[in-house]
Amino acid sequence: MSKIAVVPGSFDPVTLGHLDVIRRAAGVFDEVHVLVVHNPGKNAMLPLSERVGLIKKSLEEDPDIPDNILVASWSVGLLVDYCTEVGASVLVKGIRSQIDVAYETPMVLMNRSLAGVETVFMLPDPAHAHVSSTLVRQVASLGGDVSPYVPPAVARFLDKKRPA
Ligand code: PNS
């Protein structure tokens, strides 16, 4: 039976750190679902559909990305409900620091308790350790160059949104 993993996140927007984790997950699991999830604790910059579109475009344009990846969104219900629906038993989360471990730990235990879904932590390349969607949004909104931190499709998109 093929092992399906879900890489969930807000992806507002997707960064090079996210792509690194997605690529690593796709090397370990048979099938990877990148799932754009509404985070009730955050005010999103981009609508879910736009975030999905940017991830798809970024994956299409990256020659190092394998083809066992699909992109979807989930806005109603629990993350583990999506896992049950598609037969995924594992979540993959990218970890940059101990702060991420502390943030993720209660969710790992809750998702395991709710539905027996396990979580695997993956460490992205340390070159991306300081990169987060939050800082990318901030740098972009203040007129800075985000191209070192995001896939080209996202850099182009944010550049177009920049006030003239
Ligand atoms: O990129 P983020 O914002 O850190 O991702 C967090 C996310 C979306 C994975 C998290 O908010 C989440 O799991 N949301 C789904 C809601 C849910 O199922 N909650 C109960 C179990 S923790």
Image (cartoon, rainbow, N blue to C red):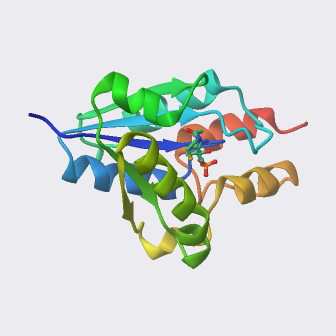
In the depicted structure, whether residue 98 falls above or below residue 51 = below
Residue lying at the far left of the rendered structure: 1
How many numbered discs?
0
In the depicted structure, whether residue 18 falls above or below residue 46 = below
Indicate left or right for 54 with 19 as reference.
right
Closest to the observer, 72 or 150: 72
Q: Looking at the image, in which quadrant does ligand 1 appear? A: top right
Residue 80: image quadrant is top left
Image point (54%, 34%), residue name: 36
Image point (70%, 26%), residue name: 47
Residue lying at the far front of the rendered structure: 113
Indicate left or right for 50 with 79 as reference.
right
For the N terminus, the image quarter is top left
Give x and y (percent) for residue 5. Answer: 30, 42
Give x and y (percent) for residue 24. Answer: 30, 56
Closest to the observer, 20 or 113: 113
For the C terminus, the image quarter is top right
Closest to the observer, 20 or 39: 39
Indicate left or right for 3 with 114 as reference.
left
Image point (36%, 22%), residue name: 85
In the depicted structure, whether residue 40 falls above or below residue 147 = above
Image point (24%, 41%), residue name: 66
Give x and y (percent) for residue 136. Answer: 71, 55
